[in-house]
Amino acid sequence: MKQLRWETENRFYCARVYKDMLDFWVVEKAWGGRQNNLGNIGQEVVPTYRDAIQTVLRIHKERRARKYDLVESR
């Protein structure tokens, strides 16, 4: 998996999965405003790739419930 991006008119949310240098799976999340420089980044370490995908699926469900549209997948 590469990166997913969700947007509303004013906000964005991104998630990506990668394996770090210590061989841990990481789900990196970034969010903020589309018209300003406000935002934040967080990481969640998970034990397996399957757990990482489950985390991204949970994020997708939450974003859709909050009326975000999936706009980009790289």
Image (tube, rainbow, N blue to C red):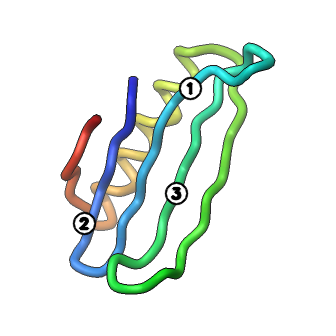
Which residue is at a point 58% across and 36% down the rendered structure image?
27
> At 63% from the left edge and 20% from the top edge, which residue is drawn?
19
The residue that label 1 is drawn on is 18
Residue 68 locus on image (x, y percent): 26, 62
- The residue mark sitting in front, 3 or 2, is 3
> Regarding mark 3 in the picture, which secondary structure is present there?
strand
Indicate the secondary structure of the residue bearing disc 2. loop
Mark 1 and mark 3 in contact? Answer it, CB < 8 Å: no
- Disc count in the image? 3
Give residue 2's mark. none
Q: Position of residue 11 (x, y in %)?
A: 35, 74
Where disc 1 sits, the SS reads: strand
Mark 3 Cα-neighbour bin, 10 Å: few <14, some 14–19, many ≥20: some
Residue matched to label 3: 30
Q: Is residue 9 above or below residue 57?
A: below
Apparent side of residue 65 relative to residue 14 in the rendered image (left or right): left
Front of the two marks 1 and 2: 1
